[in-house]
Image: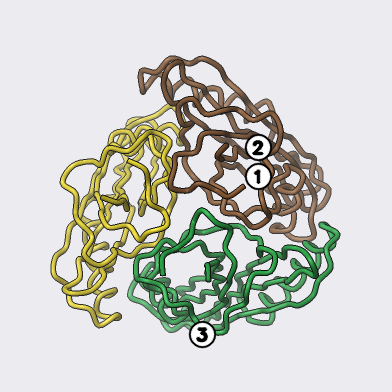
Chain colours: A green, B brown, C yellow
């Protein structure tokens, strides 16, 4: 399907993945592949969930090389044995738009807690009611050059 | 109104804001809200003012979650008492396109001077004539975690 | 020509340039001008070559201020005498999409080798066959504030 850049996205898909690579950029690339978004031209956005957007259960079928607005979080590590982690969190609004936050760090526990806290503050500050929270996160133990990625793709259906 | 991504933007709106937050990302988010761009999916661009673009006086009405090309500048501070500042400057061309520059730093005076200097050099280098300069800037004294943001939204009318 | 953001780009153009500037942002801006992409609103993307995309030999004619998806690499230096370098590499797939990688560093030799290595790994990891590699790179000896830029514009024809 073609993108519909002139319209506000009305679907989102959240994912996470991790991998090793020969270089930092390859580790990032391989982690994107593991998260099933490695063949897309990701365009980084910050970070609002359009009202009534559908939460897709499976990866949308997108032609490789398409321009895809995405909220993502990356943590690269080059110290053998260290842990890298990344999380995205979607706060769905009750009768309103929602928010998407990302965190990267040294453990899944830490980054998950961070996105949950950010969702709470983002909703409180906007005076919005939180209906549901979806978190995707990943943790990876570095062998040589490792990367953890979490991503929310904004799309159309 | 829908965006018109397939066309060159023909309107711009400049703004600035600052805020505190529980985390750095929340401080950024809250500063974006203060600047009236916190419910948009900002996509960072560098940094040309299309010819004959209209300079909007008030914030365009945009559906939350829309994909919005934006030049922006961010400065986060985590040292109580420090000052954070951000500026954007629009150089309007006489009979040509113009340029948009951003700066972030430790005082409003510094960041405003920086964007003015960049506009001068950018126009000189291109051999363009400068018709008008618009600067939006903000300065914020950090309490715990503070953020200053200045932004130029590129839009359509 | 108008952009066609709702379609997957079907043409690419690779370029590189370098320049000095009064500030780091101006050096970047001037290097973009030297690379013939300085009057565009670049939107950074990562980094897939759509299948059957045409490799343009000359810069596409694009209205100043247009929103242009671009893979780019930047290296700024502020130490007189140091060398800055940037490269982009396009790996064209045999019967499939391809990949675009970027590298920045201290010499042309280093950054060219890096993008070639990343292309090899990116193709191997995806199980794709490499048909052709195109590299654009640049090296610049810093006088005061210098910048090297390499870019691949994704476009439509």
Chain letter for mark 2: B
The kind of secondary structure element at disc 3 is strand
Q: Secondary structure at mark 1?
A: strand
Which residue lies most toward the left here? C131
Residue C112 appears in the figure = yes
Instruction: Write the residue at 53% across / 71% down.
Output: A157
Residue A4 picture location, percent across and down: 48, 60
Q: Which mark lies nearer to you, 3 or 2?
A: 2
Check disc 3 and report the residue beneath it.
A141
- In the displayed structure, would residue B31 be above or below residue C20? below
Whether residues under marks 3 and 2 lie with C-beta atoms below 8 angstroms apart, the answer is no
Number of labels in the image equals 3
Percent across and percent down for residue C15 are 24, 45
The picture places residue A70, in percent across and down from the top left corner, at 52, 64
- Marks 1 and 2: CB-CB under 8 Å? yes
Q: Can you identify the residue that label 2 sits on?
A: B86
Secondary element type, mark 2:
strand
Residue A136, numbered label: none
Q: Is residue B157 left or right of residue B126?
A: right
- Give the residue displayed 72% in from the left and 34% down from the top: B138
Query: Residue A51 at x, y = what percent?
Result: 70, 64
Image quadrant holding the N terminus of chain A, namely bottom left
Q: Which residue is mark 1?
A: B75
Above/below status of A77 relative to A58? above
- Observer-nearest of A48 and C81: A48
Q: CA distance from mark 1 to mark 3?
A: 32 Å
Circle 1: is it few (<14), some (14-19), or many (20+) Cα within 10 Å? many
Whole-number angstrom distance, CA of label 3 to CA of label 2? 38 Å
At x 57% / y 36%, what residue is drawn? B157
């Amino acid at each position: 399907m073609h993108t519909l850049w002139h319209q506000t996205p009305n679907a989102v898909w959240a994912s996470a993945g991790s991998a090793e690579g020969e270089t930092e950029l390859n580790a990032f690339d391989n982690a994107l592949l593991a998260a099933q978004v490695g063949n897309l031209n990701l365009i980084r956005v910050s970070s609002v969930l359009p009202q009534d957007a559908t939460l897709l259960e499976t990866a949308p079928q997108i032609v490789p090389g398409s321009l895809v607005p995405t909220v993502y979080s990356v943590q690269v590590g080059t110290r053998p044995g260290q842990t890298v982690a990344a999380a995205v969190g979607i706060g769905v609004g009750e009768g309103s738009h929602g928010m998407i936050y990302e965190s990267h760090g040294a453990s899944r526990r830490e980054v998950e807690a961070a996105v949950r806290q950010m969702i709470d503050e983002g909703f409180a500050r906007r005076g919005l009611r939180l209906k549901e929270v979806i978190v995707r996160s990943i943790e990876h133990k570095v062998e040589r050059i490792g990367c953890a990625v979490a991503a929310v793709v904004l799309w159309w259906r």
